[in-house]
Image (tube, rainbow, N blue to C red):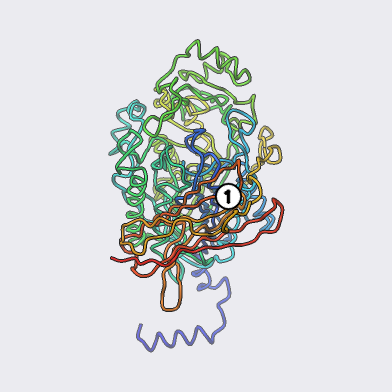
Amino acid sequence: MTRSSKGLAAVLLLVLPAIPEGTAAGNDRSRGYRIGCGSADITGPVTGVPFWGFVRADQIGRGLHLRQRARAFLVIDEHDSRLVLIVCDLGSITQELTLEVLDRLQQEFGDLYTQRNVILSATHTHAAPAGFWHAGVGTPFGTPFYREYFRNIVDGVVSAVRHAHRTARPGRILLARGDVPDAGVNRSLVAYMNNPAEERARYSGSTDTTMTLLRFETADGPIGCLNWFAVHPTTMTYHNRLVSGDNKGYAERAFEKAEGVLYRRPDDFVAAFAQSNCGDVTGNLNLDNTGPGETEFETTRIIGHRQYAVARELFEQAEDELHGPVVSRQAWVDLSCVRVRPEFTGGSEQRTAPAAWGYAFAAGSTEDGGGHPLFREGMTEPVPLLEFTLDQQFPDARPDEQLRKLHAPKAILLAPGNNMPQAGVGRPVSLTVARLGPLVLAAGPAEFTTMAGRRIRDTLRRVCGPESVRDVVIAGYSNGYAGYVTTREEYETQQYEGGHTLFGPWTLAAYRQEFAALAASLNEDPVETPVPDRFTDLRGQVTSAPLAVGPDTPPAAGQFGDVLLPPQSAYRRGQTVTVSFRTVNPRNHYPHPEFVRVERQEAAGWTTAAIDADWSVRVEFDCDDASPGACRMTVHWTPENDSPVGTCRIVHTGSWRSEADGPEQSFSGQTEPFRLDD
């Protein structure tokens, strides 16, 4: 097209009326997607609350390493069929969280968003606070419930979806796939090697190294990036006390920072690093809870950067545009009693069993930090003394002989199953199969191992037709949490993952059967499946623990925001700037969207150089909950190699109240300026 013809086209677009829907040109335009992205902070309480992942009573939060966020991606096809994919920097998703989000969305948008077309997933970071679970509260299997934290997560998720909904506009989704080398190893090779040799020979390794990435772009440019890659976020170990998104949180922040995101504008670029079938994959490459870095922070950075680097390359190279309808199907499945057909068992009909944990579950994953010293992986025979103790302490959660047979060879530790609904492990679960043209997503509430995920993908390719499927993605940790899923052969070895496969040796076969049924129904009219009668919704049935610890007692000398440890006069890149402030207990003022920021002096004034969502900034609190007065907050900022030099300062903002229910008063403090040099 010549320059003059381009000008004529532009004039015609301005003066001619819009082409009505139904004309050839209108149909061409309608074949694309409308897309939207959104993001919101969901950072949990950073002090005084136990962490989710390692279930250790001594792992209590003391500060902030990386903020938690909810990131939403909306896709709408020409028939107004839509799918929302949400990724949260959480250890898991709960069914109560999913139901509350859906209730809120339906209050705003009617029946546009339902259990069928909303996939709410967790990155599975082990360095985020617990306390948002309803299940297990009041039992030995849970932690205290903090209503404020739960509400903050819900508010953030709804806010992210709301923004994606309101800004949805015509755009393209481009798909790319590539390998992420040296970002994970199989931590359960004993189990993996028990899979058939001919099956293992089909694959080049014992982990899935492929990253599947979607690039979201409109006429104004790229607006988002969503990818799936399988690796456990356990590189921040159980020694850590700082809230963090772990290696996936690092990758998310690195990508968004490269796009200039400071979380100040609603239209910021959104990058989510979602989880896949990582049940037996660890980033601690030394297989002893360490490596490849010399510290857990360094290991987290390395594994996160390896994901980020491949994602950036795929994002820049993506050119395979998705076309086709947006379709999703969802079902509630009671995994405690599924009859599994022979085509999925390789023999006769089998059945799943009510939920039970094995001895191997209590042993923990030794490669990522072991469990109780009385247990070890591979235990398949009950220990009489342990059995007697368990019978005495947990009479309502012990198995009968029939249950032992159904779970064999698992040595059953506890079987809350149907007898303890408040434990939350025996409820029906939500499964979803969704399709974006040639991309198929299988979303489930579990930690699928490498080979378990491969078998599910093979099943879905066969059902959907391999000629029309470009990729099948396992979206784990979605819309609930129901433990691990191993292959039957892996289950036989009773490693940690098998001990945490809740519904017996045929659990994977049941998942494959139910996913296959959903995939087969993609071409049928959608049917909203009601929540089963046996489902226990624990919302409103759990007492919230108090989060605040008391009024903020003003210091006898000085005031909140005072600098207690000033900076030096000058630093070089790579040196750590350490300062501290007098502040309040952060549990008294939750949620807290910002603790500190680093500012740089420019000609026009002070501008933001780093925020407390950045890898370079760490915040630690020294508080005594028994004496809810002033706390000491220490900030560590390590300027990165590309940080601009100049005059900087560190700013702390907050609020306080002299009475527990009194009005809030804001405060701020800032250090004296200091120089940052090459």
**Residue positioned most to the top:** 384
Q: Is residue 435 left or right of residue 278?
A: right
Measured as percent of width and height from the top left, residue 197 is found at: 30, 28
- Depth check: give the residue in front, 662 or 514: 662
The image quarter containing residue 569 is bottom left
Q: Up-down: is 341 above or below 634?
A: above
Give the image location of residue 427, x and y in percent.
Answer: 61, 33
Residue 528 seen by the camera: no
**Number of residues whose C-alpha sits closer than 10 Å to that of mark 1, classed few (under 14), some (14–19) or many (20 or more):** many
Question: 153 or 270: nearer the eye?
Answer: 153
Q: Is residue 653 left or right of residue 323?
A: right
Q: Residue at x 42, y 60 (%)?
A: 256
Q: Secondary structure at mark 1?
A: loop
462 shown above or below 153:
above
Q: Is residue 464 visible?
A: yes
Residue 231 position in % (x across, y down): 39, 42
| Picture quarter with the C terminus | bottom left
How many labels, in total?
Answer: 1
Q: Residue at x 56, y 15 (%)?
A: 402
Residue ID for mark 1: 585
Residue 283's place in the image compared with 361, above or below, is below
The furthest residue to the front: 557
- In what quadrant of the picture does the N terminus appear? bottom left
Task: Check disc 1 and give the amino acid type.
Answer: Asn
Residue at position x 38%, y 69% in the image: 647
Q: Nearer the viewer, residue 119 or 379?
A: 379
Residue 230 occupies which quadrant of the picture?
A: top left
On the image, the x and y values in percent for residue 339 come to 55, 27
**Near-viewer residue (280 or 15):** 280
181 displayed left or right of 509: left
